[in-house]
Image (cartoon, rainbow, N blue to C red):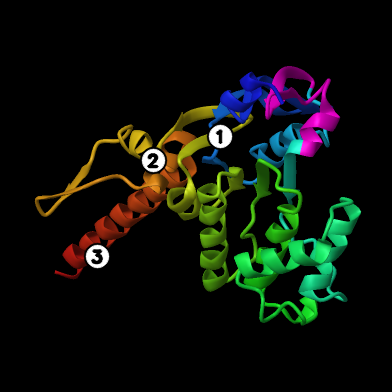
C-alpha cells in the first residue's frame, strides 16, 4: 500500500451518478470520509443510500463519476477495494444452524487465515459474546445476532467497513448495543460508513453527516455545523438548539406536513366561525 493511500481520505466520491432506466437514483454525489471516522449517509427510503454503498463496495457499476476506497478506484481496481472493505447489509447474514463461534471460524477459514479458532475466540471476547459462543445463532437476540454479524465482517481486519442500515428492525436495547459496537470500531481505527434513516442514530454516532435527498447530497458537515443552519428556538427565555431532525426536515422539505397542518387550521377556523354563528342565531 502506498503512502498516499494511507494518508489520504478513506473514501473519495466525485460526481457519482446511477440510473435504473428512467429512474435517476444518484445525480452527482460528492463526499469524502476521513480515516478512522464514522460517516453517516442519512436519507429517507429510496434516497439512494444503498445504491451508493453497492457502488463503493464494487457490487454495482456507476454510470458516471469516480469513487476511490482506501486509495483504490472502484471501477478499475475492484479486487483491491474488496480486500480493503467489509460490507454488512440491512439484515444479519449469520448461519442460524451454527453456533456463534462456528460462524466466525467458518468465515476465517473461507478467508484462508491461520488460527481460525483463536480469531473466533478473540472476536467473541471483543464483542461480549464469549458466554454465548457455544450456543446456536438461532437462539441469539436481535442485538446479539447483529453484533455477531459485525464481528464476522471484521475477520481479516479490513480498514473500512460499510454498515447499511445496521439497526433496521431492532428493539431500542438492541440498537444501543449496536451503537456501542460501532463506536468501538472507530476507537480501534476502523473507518465506518453508516447508512441510516434514523436521525437519532446519525446524531449519536457520526463524526460527519451527509444528507442524501433525491439523489444529491444537500448538506455535509458535523452535527454542530448542521445545527447552525437553523437559528436556535427560544422557549421561556431558554435558548434551544435545533435538533438534527429539525435540520433534516427543513432541508429535505416538510411541505406536505405543513400543508396538512395549514388545512387543518383552516378547518378549525371554519368550525369556530360556524359555532359562533349558531350561537348568535340561538340568541
Task: Say the numbered circle drawn on residue 35.
Answer: 1
Q: Quadrant of residue 105?
A: bottom right
Spot occupied by residue 166 in the image (x, y as percentages of width and height):
64, 56
Which mark sits nearer the N-terminus, 1 or 3? 1
- Residue 159 seen in the current view: yes
For disc 2, the neighbor class at 10 Å (few under 14, some 14 to 19, many from 20) is some
Q: Is residue 222 above or below residue 16?
A: below
Tell me which residue sits at (63%, 21%) in the image: 3
**Magenta run includes residue 67:** yes
Spot occupied by residue 138 in the image (x, y as percentages of width and height):
79, 78
Q: Secondary structure at mark 1?
A: loop
On the image, numbered disc 3 is attached to which residue?
A: 278
Q: Secondary structure at mark 3?
A: helix
Image: magenta residue range? 63-83
112 or 27, which lies in front? 112
Q: In the rendered structure, are the residues bearing label 1 and label 3 in contact, judged by CB atoms less than 8 Å apart? A: no
Spot occupied by residue 114 in the image (x, y as percentages of width and height):
84, 55
Furthest-left residue in view?
A: 237
Q: Is residue 273 left or right of residue 190?
A: left
On the image, numbered disc 2 is attached to which residue?
A: 223
Amino acid at each position: 500500500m502506498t503512502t498516499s493511500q494511507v494518508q489520504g481520505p478513506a473514501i473519495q466520491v466525485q460526481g457519482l451518478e446511477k440510473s435504473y432506466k428512467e429512474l435517476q437514483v444518484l445525480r452527482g454525489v460528492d463526499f469524502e470520509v476521513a480515516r478512522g471516522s464514522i460517516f453517516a449517509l442519512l436519507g429517507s427510503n429510496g434516497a439512494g443510500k444503498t445504491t451508493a454503498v453497492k457502488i463503493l463496495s464494487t457490487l454495482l457499476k456507476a454510470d458516471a463519476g469516480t469513487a476511490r476506497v482506501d486509495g483504490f478506484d472502484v471501477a478499475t481496481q475492484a479486487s483491491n477495494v474488496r480486500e480493503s472493505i467489509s460490507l454488512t447489509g440491512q439484515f444479519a447474514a449469520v448461519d442460524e444452524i451454527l453456533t456463534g463461534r462456528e460462524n466466525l471460524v467458518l468465515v476465517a477459514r473461507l478467508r484462508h487465515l491461520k488460527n481460525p479458532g483463536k480469531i473466533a475466540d478473540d472476536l467473541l471476547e471483543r464483542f461480549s459474546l464469549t458466554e454465548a459462543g457455544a450456543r446456536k445463532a438461532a437462539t441469539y437476540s436481535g442485538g446479539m445476532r447483529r453484533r455477531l454479524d459485525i464481528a464476522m465482517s471484521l475477520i481479516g481486519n479490513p480498514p473500512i467497513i460499510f454498515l447499511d442500515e445496521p439497526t433496521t428492525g431492532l428493539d431500542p436495547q438492541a440498537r444501543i448495543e449496536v451503537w456501542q459496537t460501532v463506536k468501538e470500531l472507530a476507537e480501534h481505527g476502523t473507518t465506518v460508513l453508516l447508512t441510516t434513516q434514523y436521525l437519532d442514530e446519525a446524531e449519536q454516532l457520526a463524526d460527519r453527516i451527509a444528507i442524501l435527498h433525491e439523489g444529491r447530497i444537500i448538506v455535509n458537515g458535523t452535527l454542530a455545523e448542521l445545527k447552525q443552519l437553523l437559528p436556535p428556538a427560544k422557549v421561556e427565555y431558554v435558548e434551544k438548539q435545533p435538533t438534527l431532525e429539525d435540520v433534516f426536515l427543513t432541508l429535505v422539505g416538510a411541505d406536505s406536513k405543513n400543508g396538512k397542518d395549514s388545512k387543518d387550521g383552516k378547518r378549525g377556523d371554519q368550525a369556530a366561525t360556524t359555532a359562533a354563528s349558531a350561537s348568535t342565531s340561538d340568541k
